[in-house]
Amino acid sequence: MANLSAEELLAGAAGTFTVALPSSVLRPGAEEGVVGTAGEVVLRPLQIRDVERVSRAAKEQRVLTSVLMVQQALVTPKLSVEQVGSLSAGVVQFLLEKVNAISGLSLGEDDLDRAVKAPLAKACFVLAREFGWTPAECSELTVGQVLLYLEMLARNGQGEALER
């Protein structure tokens, strides 16, 4: 297998994807039983700097995160944040799924199943339940800190042992 050049590696981030917007998503219930396409939009994959910008701008507002991600990825038509925020929730959800997929941010069913069963995910779930921590607080812990807190719980008899 040949090594990729920097140009080849970066080329993937520059691509665009034409996505058909189903009529049922754009106008739910308006055309009962009619299956078709309302039109097309052009999306680009989000780059690391886009995700970082969205993350900083949205802080902990999940809805704003979705709106910003769709707004950043839309090439045609180009919409402002306010315009994307004015779209129906169904349209934003549909476009966000497409943005996540083309950006490599979505998990397949097998990936999700593996993530839920992962020992670190189980440990964070136990810590969140025992200490009342939020997922954001748990995500800031190092592996060493997670292990230390689990050991403290186990020694105090309060914690639930993780399956190995």
Image (cartoon, rainbow, N blue to C red):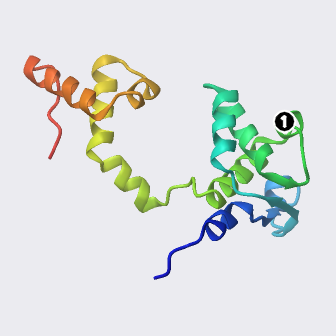
Q: Going by the image, does 43 lie left or right of 143?
A: right
* Residue of label 1: 81
* Residue in view at x 75 percent, y 58 percent: 44
Q: Position of residue 35 (x, y in %)?
A: 81, 69
Q: Going by the image, does 93 lie left or right of 3?
A: right
* Residue in view at x 71 percent, y 32 percent: 64
How crowded is the residue under tag 1: few (<14 C-alpha within 10 Å), some, or many (20+)? some
Which of the two residues, 28 or 119, is positioned nearer the viewer here? 119
Q: Position of residue 66 (x, y in %)?
A: 69, 40
Q: Going by the image, does 115 lie left or right of 28?
A: left
Which of the two residues, 29 or 48, is positioned nearer the viewer here? 48
Could one spot residue 61 in this view of the protein?
A: no
Based on the displayed image, in which of its 4 quarters is residue 36 positioned? bottom right
Q: Position of residue 119 (x, y in %)?
A: 26, 44
User: Which amino acid lies under the numbered mark 1 shown in the image of this protein?
Assistant: Val
* Residue in view at x 14 percent, y 26 percent: 151
Look at the numbered disc 1 and give the secondary structure of its residue.
Answer: helix
Based on the displayed image, in which of its 4 quarters is residue 104 positioned? bottom right
Q: Position of residue 50 (x, y in %)?
A: 69, 43
Identify whether 79 is placed above or below 99.
Answer: above
Identify whether 28 is placed above or below 124.
Answer: below
Based on the displayed image, in which of its 4 quarters is residue 147 positioned? top left
* Residue in view at x 67 percent, y 66 percent: 12
